[in-house]
Amino acid sequence: MNSSAKNVLTGDLKYLGLGDILQLIGANGSTGVLKLSCRFAPHPALLYFKDGNPVDARCGDLGGLDALYPLFGWTEGAFEFTQEAVHGQKVINKSRMGIILEGLKLKDDGKIEIIGPDSLLGVAKTTGFSGEEIPLVKGPLVDYMYVVDEEDFFDGEHIVEEGRHGNWMWVILEGVVEIAKETSAGTLPILRLGSGCFVGSLATFLVHGNIRAASVVAVGNVQLGVLDSQRLAQEYAGLPREFRHLLVSLDRRLKATTARVIATRTGKQLISPDLDAMTPFLPQRDAAEEILHVIHSGEVWVHRERPKPLTLARLGKGDYVGHLPFLHLRQEPEFAAVYADAELVTESVPVAPLKEAYEGMSSTFKNIVDNAAACVSVTTELLSAVSEQKGTLTTN
């Protein structure tokens, strides 16, 4: 940035998309540089404007419209516009409005990759459960700040064995691993994790003497980065008490949803609620308010009402239910309702301090939390697919 540059516009891409930003800059006839950054993207992007019109763009090795159009898929990140002189040739000749309309159309048509928390979900679909098609969770770019060593594993080698003690956590540098559970029907794969994902749950460093809840097996050759567990534990200890409790609840929610996947796949009788005898606590709704509750006593059932009924999880004392704007669980309130028993006692929890704590975490710790949320999302959709295949959507 040159000495005469003036920062005039900053914000969050979650609340102001690229199309809106282009219109704002155009309406003011501004000349300068727009910088976009997203921790899920390999490179930041630079857009150059003269008199309100984009004249060039750069992102990694791409330039011009080839660099600009993919930015319509960035759903999370930061932007910063500085007024300054822009030199160089005009590479982009298309009108500003033409660019906006074309970019939005490409996004709607699925021709632009969505970059953000939802892109962690990867292939969250399945048509059968023979092991030939297993959901894949993708990770963000690897942050090496907490990596203290590297380890290599070969195809079929066990990295973690279910039931064993262990407090190590790894980040996948290269390759894919498979998460599997031992059941009465044999070993059942649940999902796969790709580069940037983490091996080891939040409980790995939350619980002393942690017992591994599932096995992890290398699919092909895999390179893992060993994380500094002491630094992770110290960062966790420095988080606000409410946020630490929220992370414990997130880990329990993942285990609760996974347990229902396993029960459904093995034909085990599911413990399910009599919703007619319970009280609706949070409805399933599209426009979610930022309302969060912690359970002090009693229990709730997270139940998807549409498009088809499906019980997702059973939660109790110490768990959190409601809307968290910085985590994407594909459960309540947008994708499920919450029903309460007669013993339920809850307390409202302010969301703003939790959001502030989340934003203040290191990139590694934030990625771990995002990865756990992505696994909840994928496991939730996997449960839906398994239930539909088994014909148990109403879970008797």
Image (cartoon, rainbow, N blue to C red):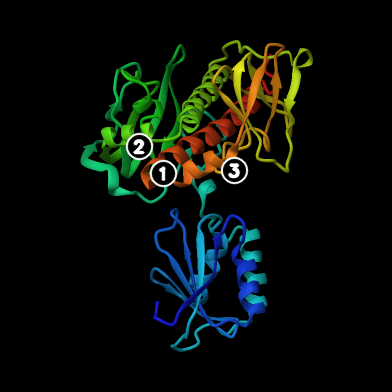
Mark 3 vs 1, N-terminal side: 3
Residue type of the residue flagged with mark 2: Glu
SS at circle 1: loop
Relative image position of residue 17 (x, y in whole percent):
61, 62
Task: State if disc 1 and disc 3 touch (CB < 8 Å).
Answer: no
Q: Can residue 134 be seen in this view?
A: no
Label 2 neighbourhood size at 10 Å, few (<14), some (14-19), many (20+)? few
> Residue drawn at (32%, 34%), measured in percent from left and top?
234
- Label 1 close to label 2 by CB (< 8 Å): yes
Quadrant in which the C terminus appears: top right
Q: In this view, does 322 lie to the left or right of 66?
A: right
The kind of residue tagged 3 is Pro
Determine which of the numbered discs, if any, sits on residue 235 in the image: 2
Q: Which of 227 and 130 is in front in this view?
A: 227
> Mark 2 and mark 3: span between their CA atoms?
22 Å
- The quarter of the displayed image where residue 227 is located: top left
Name the side, left or right, on which 114 lies relative to 290.
Answer: left
- Residue under numbered circle 3: 325
SS assignment at label 2: helix
Quarter of the image with the N terminus is bottom left
Q: Which residue is drawn at 65% across and 40% down?
A: 290
Amino acid beneath label 1: Met
| Residue identified by numbered label 1 | 361
Q: Where is residue 26 in the image (x, y as percent from the top left)?
A: 63, 78
Q: In this view, does 367 lie above or below 319?
A: below
| Percent position of residue 145, x then y | 28, 47
* Real-space Cα separation, disc 3 to disc 1, in angstroms: 16 Å
Residue 78 tag number: none
Q: Which of marks 3 and 1 is in front?
A: 1
